[in-house]
Image (cartoon, rainbow, N blue to C red):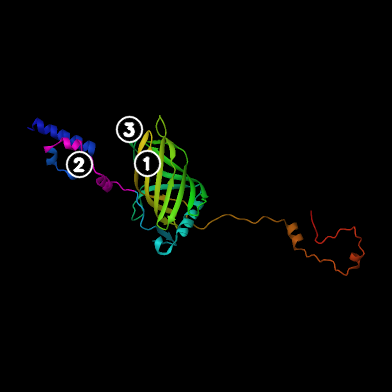
């Protein structure tokens, strides 16, 4: 028979695993728990341990740009202006379009899930928030030559519900060939019955595919308010159109056949030695060209 003391320790160990997960057992053994079970309840993982399990936002070493079905690091043969112009053309071609968002692998640039996940607490309920697409509603060239102003509408869902969110005034900032950020000043979502939640997003771009309209990078999304929390990782922004060709749809004005015939007629100016011109009175007006009303 198992003693009552051992049963209590087993129950405590099960409680620790339910509340703390396996973080305690990564640095401790079962013997440590049997000797001092109360240490497990006071255990808090360090920042280094959390950083190992949680992908963090980081600046890329070099942005990979794909064009003409060939990919290469931008620092080898590209400039900041080229990356800025490429992103501007890409967003201009996809203005008023819906861009899909997926959690992806940073090495292969393939989607792992059709959304990105953030762990939040809505009121007193722990849950997950998801973003699966964003709609681009406006693209404006910034006053600074290295900025692009965007109006984005994120589709935020949580616990089987869709949050009512305001548009996010975002900016794409290209500081240099290795530093391109998409960030916003924060947008508001109605996620609980009391108050509104403010959401901020940062997207460090490290992959641009001009052939298929993909933008990849590390993201960080934070929630503040009645629903708080956040998440980070690697994601792909999949745009429906590529970066080329541009289609401004410029058309010449239509010209009627009668006006075209009148424009093609040749006009012979009167000779200077024409006697009729010399006999004209001073009060008569001189008509140099055939004016038409």
**Residue farthest along the left direction in this orientation:** 1
In the rendered image, the quadrant that contains the N terminus is top left
Queried whether the magenta region covers residue 169, the answer comes back as: no
Q: Name the residue under label 1.
A: 222
The span shown in magenta is: 35-56
In depth, the one of 270 and 109 nearer the eye is 270
- In the rendered image, which quarter is residue 225 located in? top left
Queried whether the magenta region covers residue 54, the answer comes back as: yes
Q: Earlier in the sequence, mark 3 or mark 2?
A: 2
In depth, the one of 11 and 81 nearer the eye is 81
Q: State left or right for residue 212 relative to residue 32.
A: right
Residue 278: give x, y in percent of width and height.
Answer: 91, 66
Assess disc 3: are there few (<14), some (14-19) or many (≥20) residues with their C-alpha within 10 Å of its C-alpha.
few
Q: Earlier in the sequence, mark 2 or mark 1?
A: 2
Q: Which residue sits at x=11%, y=41%?
A: 31
In depth, the one of 84 and 211 nearer the eye is 84
- Mark number displayed over residue 287: none
Q: Earlier in the sequence, mark 3 or mark 1?
A: 3
Q: Name the residue under label 2.
A: 24
Under circle 2, the secondary element is: helix
Q: Name the residue under label 3.
A: 125
Height in image: 90 above or below 155?
below
Residue 70: give x, y in percent of width and height.
Answer: 41, 62
């Amino acid at each position: 028979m198992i003693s009552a003391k051992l049963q209590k320790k087993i129950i405590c160990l099960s409680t620790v695993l339910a509340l703390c997960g396996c973080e305690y057992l990564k640095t401790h053994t079962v013997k440590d728990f049997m000797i001092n079970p109360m240490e497990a309840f006071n255990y808090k993982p360090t920042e280094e341990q959390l950083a190992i399990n949680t992908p963090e936002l980081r600046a890329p070493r070099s942005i990979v740009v794909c064009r003409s079905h060939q990919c290469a690091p931008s620092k080898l043969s590209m400039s900041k202006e080229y990356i800025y112009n490429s992103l501007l053309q890409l967003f201009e071609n996809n203005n008023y379009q819906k861009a899909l968002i997926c959690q992806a692998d940073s090495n292969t640039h393939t989607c792992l899930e059709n959304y990105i996940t953030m762990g939040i607490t809505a009121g007193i309920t722990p849950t997950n928030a998801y973003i699966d697409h964003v709609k681009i509603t406006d693209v404006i060239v910034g006053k600074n030559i290295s900025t692009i102003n965007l109006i984005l509408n994120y589709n935020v869902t949580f616990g089987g519900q869709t949050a009512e969110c305001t548009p996010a005034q975002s900016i794409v900032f290209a500081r240099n060939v290795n530093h391109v950020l998409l960030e916003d000043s924060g947008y508001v979502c109605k996620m609980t019955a009391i108050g509104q939640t403010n959401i901020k997003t940062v997207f460090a771009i490290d992959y641009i595919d001009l052939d298929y309209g993909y933008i990849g990078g590390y993201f960080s999304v934070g929630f503040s308010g009645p629903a708080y929390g956040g998440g980070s990782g690697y994601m792909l922004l999949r745009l429906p159109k590529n970066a080329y060709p541009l289609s401004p749809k410029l058309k010449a004005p239509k010209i009627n056949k009668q006006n075209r015939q009148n424009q093609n007629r040749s006009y012979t100016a009167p000779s200077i030695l024409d006697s009729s011109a010399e006999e004209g009175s001073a009060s008569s007006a001189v008509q140099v060209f055939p004016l038409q009303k």
